[in-house]
Image (cartoon, grey):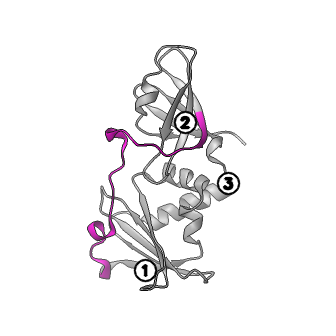
């Protein structure tokens, strides 16, 4: 079960109007989906993601932007390791993004594509609150292993890789397999029994 701050639109569903609430939903890691909620008449609404959606967020819904230049500090003291997990698997797959985002709160990801200056791509993971960061470099034609560097109070790559492996072990649930329960004070997200 995952608890997060309720969406503003979901809080409007206090009365049973016989209607449906459609609202964008995302977290720091997951780009976003269209959440369809049914008001139950007691201030609670339940539902699930019904599709992909990218909207202009309300100010209090927006996740602060991050930049590598602002947050990546002290990179010469980063811990170095390696992984066989390709960056697309944890950051490019829509359904994996949702699971990772639920299990690794406050983590943002950015991707720098290979270009004429650097033939490697880099996946950056950043937690703006703690200042922790991680990077995973890869060459597009390589099958791994890929270099991982981490720094700060959180080991973001370790957390993201563990969340990804949890998602794989759960048989790759889709975004539509998660059930949302929203009240004016709380939000719970649970994976449907399989």
Tell me whether the residue at label 1 lies in contact with that at label 2, contact meaning CB atoms closer than 8 angstroms.
no
Tell me whether the residue at label 2 lies in contact with that at label 3, contact meaning CB atoms closer than 8 angstroms.
no
Question: In the image, which disc is placed on residue 80?
Answer: 1
Q: Which residues are magenta?
A: 48-76
Q: Secondary structure at mark 1?
A: strand
- Residue 121, how many percent across, how many down? 49, 77
The residue positioned farthest toward the right in the image shown: 194
Vertical side of 41 occupied by 129: above or below: below
Label 3 vs 1, first from the N-terminus? 1
In this rendering, the label closer to the viewer, 2 or 3 = 2
Q: Which residue is mark 2?
A: 35
Q: Secondary structure at mark 2?
A: strand
Q: Which residue is mark 3?
A: 172
Q: Residues within 10 Å of mark 3 (few under 14, many from 20)?
A: some
In this rendering, the label closer to the viewer, 1 or 2 = 2
The structure residue drawn at horizontal position 62% and vertical position 55%, both measured from the top left corner, is 167
Which residue occupies the foreground of this view, 67 or 99?
Answer: 67
| Mark-to-mark CA distance, 3 and 1 | 28 Å
Label 1 vs 2, first from the N-terminus? 2
* Quarter of the C terminus within the rendering: top right
Vertical side of 17 occupied by 57: above or below: below
The structure residue drawn at horizontal position 54% and vertical position 64%, both measured from the top left corner, is 161
Which residue occupies the foreground of this view, 172 or 159?
Answer: 172
- Residue 12, how many percent across, how many down? 43, 22
Q: Residues within 10 Å of mark 1 (few under 14, many from 20)?
A: few
Residue 173 magenta-highlighted: no
Q: How many labels were placed on the picture?
A: 3
- Residue 140, how many percent across, how many down? 58, 80
Label 2 vs 3, first from the N-terminus? 2
| Mark-to-mark CA distance, 2 and 3 | 20 Å
Q: Secondary structure at mark 3?
A: loop
Tell me whether the residue at label 3 lies in contact with that at label 1, contact meaning CB atoms closer than 8 angstroms.
no
């Amino acid at each position: 079960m995952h608890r997060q701050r309720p969406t503003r639109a979901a809080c409007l569903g206090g009365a049973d109007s016989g209607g449906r609430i459609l609202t964008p939903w995302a977290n720091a890691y997951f780009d976003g989906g269209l959440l369809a909620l049914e008001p139950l008449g007691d201030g609670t609404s339940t539902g699930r993601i019904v599709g992909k959606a990218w909207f202009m967020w309300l100010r209090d819904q927006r996740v602060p932007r991050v930049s590598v230049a602002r947050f990546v500090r002290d990179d010469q003291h980063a811990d170095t390791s390696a992984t066989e997990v390709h960056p697309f698997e944890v950051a490019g797959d829509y359904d994996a993004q949702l699971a990772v985002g639920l299990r690794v709160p406050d983590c943002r990801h950015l991707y720098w594509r290979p270009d004429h200056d650097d033939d490697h791509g880099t996946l950056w993971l950043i937690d703006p609150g703690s200042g922790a960061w991680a990077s995973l470099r890869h060459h597009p034609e390589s099958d791994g292993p890929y270099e991982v560097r981490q720094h700060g109070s959180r080991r973001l790559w370790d957390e993201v890789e563990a969340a990804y492996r949890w998602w794989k072990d759960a048989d790759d649930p889709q975004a539509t397999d998660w059930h949302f329960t929203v009240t004016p004070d709380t939000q719970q997200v649970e994976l449907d029994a399989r």
